[in-house]
Image (spheres, helix red, strand yellow):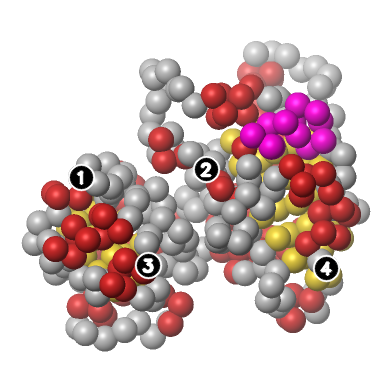
């Protein structure tokens, strides 16, 4: 089977080439993202392998089907960038990696929280310049604070347990509460109560039509003054214009984002010699109480190994006319 990869970085090639030793697929890599501009390069491939910023619209899927592609393999958990109805219409199977390393993403969310709170990134730069002053580095104890977690799937569940370990009161909201998590001390409450009572709010939910711009002017209005907000899920969970206004008014005290709704034009690229014309990201980067990482939360040795192995195993099984044993892998 030939597989064409898009948005392929050097680390993707390293981990997939290593995993492919057990499968022997023919792999073709393209660093550019998949979209109408490049889809016609797919030739004689049974599958395409894509990532979070590839755009699999109905138009792109139609071309893929016409060129003989049978499978779209997402090397991530989210699938909001794929027109699943179009895939079904053209008979394409869509698979994903539903849980590669929940710990990787949850731990990164915690790292961002600790960094923005205790300002270790600023302290590091100061000390390197022989500035040992503590002025402006004041933080707060996490112990005893109320942490709200929206979405308690695999990643949210790990994050909850870490926060319990810090001695926090943990509130959670999910349409499908996890009974076992409730037994650990996590309290499931309404979304409104979570927003009202939390000192820290972390988002761990997939992006859907229902929760698009979950964090907006109205929901921010329910939050405590000075709240710390963390998003390691999907950029469009947050209305960027509204969060900028909340930062300016100091309603939001700290913002940590590993995702951004216009990230496909920015993330995973070196733009150090480029003029960035996105005014919103430039405004966000100008705030001293905003911490941005470039979709890095998944980026661990363990996660990349699991992503490569699960993706190629799914393609091998589908190539035999079978389906993976884990039903959550398949989207069509």
Name the quarter where the N terminus is drawn: bottom left
Is disc 4 placed on a helix, strand or loop? loop
For the point 43% across and 34% down, the residue is 266
Dot 3 or dot 1: first in sequence order is 1
Q: Residue 157's spot in the image, x, y percent?
A: 67, 67
Quadrant of the rendered image containing residue 256: top right
Question: Mark 1 or mark 4, which has the lower sequence index?
Answer: 1
Would residue 3 be counted in the magenta stretch?
A: no
| Distance between the alpha carbons at the discs numbered 1 and 4 | 46 Å
Q: How crowded is mark 1: few (under 14 residues within 10 Å), some or many (20 or more)?
A: few
Residue under pointer 2: 261
- Span shown in magenta: 241-252
Identify residue for label 4.
189
Callouts 4 and 2 close, C-beta under 8 Å: no
Q: Nearer the viewer, residue 326 or 245?
A: 245
Give neighbour class at mark 3: few <14, some 14-19, many 20+ (Cα, 10 Å).
many
Number of residues whose C-alpha sits closer than 10 Å to that of mark 4, classed few (under 14), some (14–19) or many (20 or more): some
What residue is disc 1 on? 38
Instruction: Label the magenta part by its dominant secondary structure.
Output: helix
Asked whether disc 3 touches disc 1, contact meaning CB atoms under 8 Å apart, the reply is: no
Q: Quadrant of the C terminus?
A: bottom left
Residue 159 point in image, percent of width and height: 68, 60
Would you call the spot at circle 2 few (<14 residues within 10 Å), some (14-19), or many (20 or more)?
A: some
Between 321 and 104, the one lying in front of the other is 321
């Amino acid at each position: 089977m030939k597989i064409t990869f898009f948005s392929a970085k050097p680390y993707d090639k390293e981990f997939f080439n290593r995993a492919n030793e057990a499968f022997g697929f023919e792999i073709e890599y393209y660093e550019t993202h998949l979209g109408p501009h490049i889809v016609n390069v797919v030739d004689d491939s049974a599958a395409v392998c894509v990532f979070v910023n590839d755009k699999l619209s109905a138009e792109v899927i139609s071309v893929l089907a016409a060129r003989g592609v049978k499978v779209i393999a997402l090397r991530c958990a989210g699938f909001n960038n794929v027109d699943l109805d179009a895939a079904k219409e053209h008979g394409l199977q869509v698979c994903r990696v539903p849980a590669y390393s929940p710990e990787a993403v949850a731990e990164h969310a915690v790292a961002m929280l600790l960094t923005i709170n205790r300002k270790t990134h600023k302290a590091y730069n100061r000390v390197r310049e022989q500035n040992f002053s503590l002025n402006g580095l004041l933080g707060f104890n996490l112990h005893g604070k109320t942490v709200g977690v929206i979405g308690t799937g695999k990643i949210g569940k790990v994050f909850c347990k870490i926060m319990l370990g810090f001695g926090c009161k943990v509130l959670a909201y999910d349409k499908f509460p996890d009974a076992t998590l409730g037994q650990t001390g996590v309290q499931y409450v309404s979304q409104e109560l979570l927003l009202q009572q939390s000192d820290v709010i972390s988002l761990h939910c997939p992006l859907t039509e229902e929760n698009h711009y979950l964090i907006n002017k109205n929901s921010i209005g329910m939050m405590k003054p000075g709240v710390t907000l963390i998003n390691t899920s999907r950029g469009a969970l947050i209305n960027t214009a509204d969060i900028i206004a909340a930062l300016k008014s100091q309603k939001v005290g700290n913002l940590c984002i590993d995702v951004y709704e216009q990230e496909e034009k920015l993330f995973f690229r070196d733009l150090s010699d480029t003029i960035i014309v996105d005014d919103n990201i430039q405004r966000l980067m100008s705030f001293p109480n905003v911490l941005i990482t470039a979709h890095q939360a998944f980026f661990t040795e363990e996660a990349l190994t699991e992503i490569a192995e699960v993706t190629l195993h799914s393609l091998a099984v589908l190539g035999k006319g079978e389906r993976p044993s884990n039903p959550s892998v398949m989207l069509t």
